Amino acid sequence: MKYSYEFKKDPFGITRIELPEKISIFSDFIEDISTIKEVDEYIGYVKKVLEGVYKDFEITLNATSVNIKKNVTIAEHHYRIDEPLENTIETDEFL
């Protein structure tokens, strides 16, 4: 993996994933996923985009969404006040 990550407990005792600031919105997206079944489903969509089955694919969750394209994936936070509102990562690194 190109990007470092760390798991930490927040003040409420919830384990959170910390990613570098330039891709921090992806941690919000990951934390929005509520079941293993969803994880498997979303990984399947990413693979289908990488394989060319889909040109792109968008997943919208509670506060975040990702737009998956063959080369890059863009995460957007819909309710964040401070910039950045979007982060970009290479799609193969998102997988």
Image (cartoon, helix red, strand yellow):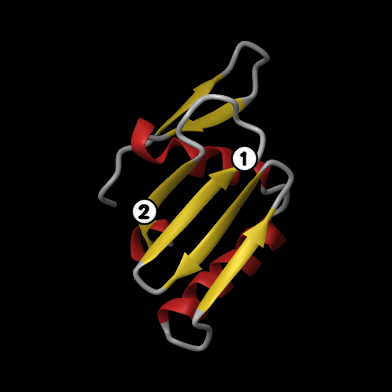
At label 1, the amino acid type is Glu
Query: Residue furthest toward the left?
Result: 2
Q: Residue at x 40, y 35 (%)?
A: 19
Q: What element does badge 2 sit on?
A: strand
At label 2, the amino acid type is Ile
27 or 15, which lies in front?
Answer: 27
Q: Which mark is residue 31?
A: 1
How far across and down, in percent of the image, does residue 86 sit? 48, 44
- Relative height, residue 3 to residue 56 (above, below): above
How far across and down, in percent of the image, does residue 60 sit? 68, 56
- Relative height, residue 80 to residue 54 (above, below): above
Horizontally, residue 64 falls left or right of residue 56, namely: right
Q: Quadrant of residue 12?
A: top right
Please give the residue where the numbered disc 2 appears in the rendered image.
89
Horizontally, residue 23 falls left or right of residue 9, namely: left
Q: Residue at x 44, y 36 (%)?
A: 24
Q: Residue at x 35, y 37 (%)?
A: 22
Estimate the spatial distance between the alpha carbons at disc 1 and disc 2, rounded to whole Å.
17 Å
- Relative height, residue 24 to residue 12 (above, below): below
Q: Residues within 10 Å of mark 1 (few under 14, many from 20)?
A: few
Give the quarter of the figure containing the C terminus. bottom left
